[in-house]
Image (tube, helix red, strand yellow):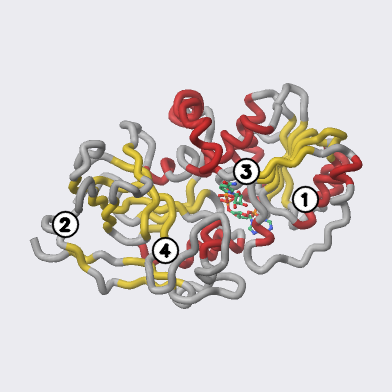
Amino acid sequence: MSPTRNAAVLFNEIPNDFPVPGKTTKYDESSTIDLDNVSLGEDGVLVKTVALSIDPYLRSKMRAADIESYQPPYLLGKPLNSLGVGRVVRSQNPKFKAGERVYGLFEHQEYNIFDKDSFLQALPETPLSSATLVGAAGMPGGTAYIGYKEYAQAEKGKTIFISTGAGAVGSVVGQLAKLDGLKVIGSAGSDEKVEYMKSLGFDVAFNYKKTDTLEVLKKEGPIDIYWENVGGATLDAAIETLKKDGIIIVCGQITAYNGGDGYNYKNLWQIFARSIHIHGFLYFDLMPKWIEQFSKEFLPLIEKGIIKHKEEVVHGLDKVGDAILRVQKGENKAKSVVLVADDKDSH
Ligand SMILES: NC(=O)c1ccc[n+]([C@@H]2O[C@H](COP(=O)([O-])OP(=O)(O)OC[C@H]3O[C@@H](n4cnc5c(N)ncnc54)[C@H](OP(=O)(O)O)[C@@H]3O)[C@@H](O)[C@H]2O)c1
């Protein structure tokens, strides 16, 4: 077979603040791959990329290679990477069969060869789309489930506030809390997202760009649990309205990812004054503990439509740069996914 195009998205330049498509990242069609003859090495698996997850944390990987952080940096001139779903084209590894869907850490190119040390998992047969498998049924939904189960101490009658409540993680946290009988308050950055939170059953949903978060929390609180996704003034307002012994689950702080918004915290001292318990966590650290329960208890809730989800899907690897920027600017309307190939395609 003649060589097949293997387009990629390369890390081209370290951004100062927001990543610029075409400058920070570059779509490149110069590489090819011989799908029938390329050497896979011992236990290698050739996979066609189907769906790529575009997440807020990708911005933290766009840094100089010598700066330490919780995620390895992208390397200049090399493809970006993120979690994704693909279809096995050929396999030297008995754990993976040609034609089956897999979940793993994908370089942003049309085809990838995974070696035995790569993060790659076979996916069970499921009617869920590849976009959902990188969203509510993948890392973002998993982050919501494990963080909530591990730290929330949820009980009927308690009140939880979730920032970015319409997002991939927040929308799942809110639905889990509703299933447990909590009062759920969610904030988001557009009226459309507010409507979405209401459609999921949130008791209170508001647009933080139009309504003051502190005022809402004073009226609807006090709160027992704050699910933190953004930082800044929202975190300050949540601390001010948390009960004594309240819980903050720090999942992310998106206002800090693009150089920070310079917010000057006023209420951090209340953390000791009100014995507030703060738990930061990373999905990959907690997941091994919860993976079995996640698969048994949570995935069926998605398959049965009890936990609802929404994806913002764009088609084509060349759209990765724009999708990343949309997430950083808060312009994505739902879980951001780039569909690189037809979901049913093999090769
Ligand atoms: N700890 C972990 O292992 C882990 C794993 C996954 C995700 N996370 C974190 O969880 C959070 C949510 O992730 P996600 O995947 O669900 O993202 P997402 O909600 O699908 O997308 C990001 C959202 O952040 C909001 N946003 C962007 N800029 C903002 C700003 N300056 N102020 C307030 N909100 C802003 C926007 O929503 P609005 O329109 O509502 O502002 C945007 O749509 C992020 O902080 C992410 O880093 C952590």
Residue 48: horizontal and vertical position, in percent?
A: 26, 52
Disc 2 marks a residue whose amino acid type is Ser
For the residues labelled 4 and 3, the Cα–Cα distance comes to: 24 Å
Q: Is mark 2 on a helix, strand or loop?
A: loop
Q: Name the residue under label 3.
A: 281
Label 2 – label 4 distance at C-alpha: 22 Å
Q: What residue type is labelled 1?
A: Leu
Comes first in the chain, label 1 or label 2: 2
- The residue where tag 4 is placed is 80
Q: Reading the chain from its start, which is encountered first: label 2 or label 4?
A: 2
Which mark is nearer the camera, 4 or 3?
Answer: 3
Q: Is mark 3 on a helix, strand or loop?
A: loop
**Nearer to us: label 1 or label 4:** 4
The amino acid type found where label 3 is placed reads: Phe
State the image coordinates of residue 54 (x, y, percent, origin top left).
Answer: 48, 55
The residue that disc 1 covers is: 235
Q: Which residue is drawn at 88% across and 56% down?
A: 266
The residue shown at (64%, 36%) is 174
Residue to which mark 2 is pinned: 39
Compute the Cα span from label 2 to label 3.
39 Å
Nearer the N terminus, badge 2 or badge 3? 2
Inter-mark Cα distance, 1 to 2: 51 Å
- Up-down relation of residue 300 to residue 108 (above or below): above
